[in-house]
Image: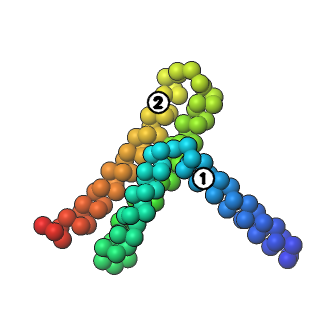
Amino acid sequence: MAAEGFRGLRKLWKAFQWSLKGFRSGWRHEASFRLEVYLAIVLVPLGLWLGRGSLEKLALVFPLLLALAVELLNSAIEAVVDKVSPEFNELAGRAKDMGSAAVFLLLVMVVLSWGLILLPRWI
């Protein structure tokens, strides 16, 4: 039983290392990911400070983190599409455009969350 637990911890550690590798890859190769990380570095602490109560804090911070995750997924889609189909292909272009649209929708969610929570306080 103890050996199984150790293997489970080893697998967890490996999964963590692969995740860090993914973050490094996103940082190294994707300017949009870097920009969104910079925004998150500023806006996550600001959201935690400005949010009144747990739900507001969550509504301000969660979309930012979700946008980072979807940006990484979009970058993964683009990398796979470029590997499989380096020449122009309508379906490949559609896949890339849809990934980009998903990121855009999350950025709209960030703006809406921040606007709906904070604008009424200043108006």
Disc 1 marks a residue whose amino acid type is Arg
The residue beneath circle 2 is 94
The quadrant in which the C terminus is found is: bottom left
Indicate left or right for 3 with 23 as reference: right
The quadrant in which the N terminus is found is: bottom right
Q: Position of residue 35 (x, y in %)?
A: 43, 51
Q: Residue at x 39, y 57 (%)?
A: 39
* Secondary structure under the numbered disc 2 in the rendered image: helix
Disc 2 marks a residue whose amino acid type is Arg
Q: Position of residue 57 (x, y in %)?
A: 36, 72
Q: Position of residue 83 (x, y in %)?
A: 63, 31
Query: What colour scheme was applied to this rendering of the protein?
Result: rainbow
Q: Nearer the viewer, residue 72 or 41?
A: 41
The residue beneath circle 1 is 24
Q: Residue at x 45, y 45 (%)?
A: 32
Q: Residues within 10 Å of mark 1 (few under 14, many from 20)?
A: few
Q: Is residue 67 visible?
A: no
94 versus 88 height, above or below: below
Q: Residue at x 58, y 37 (%)?
A: 79
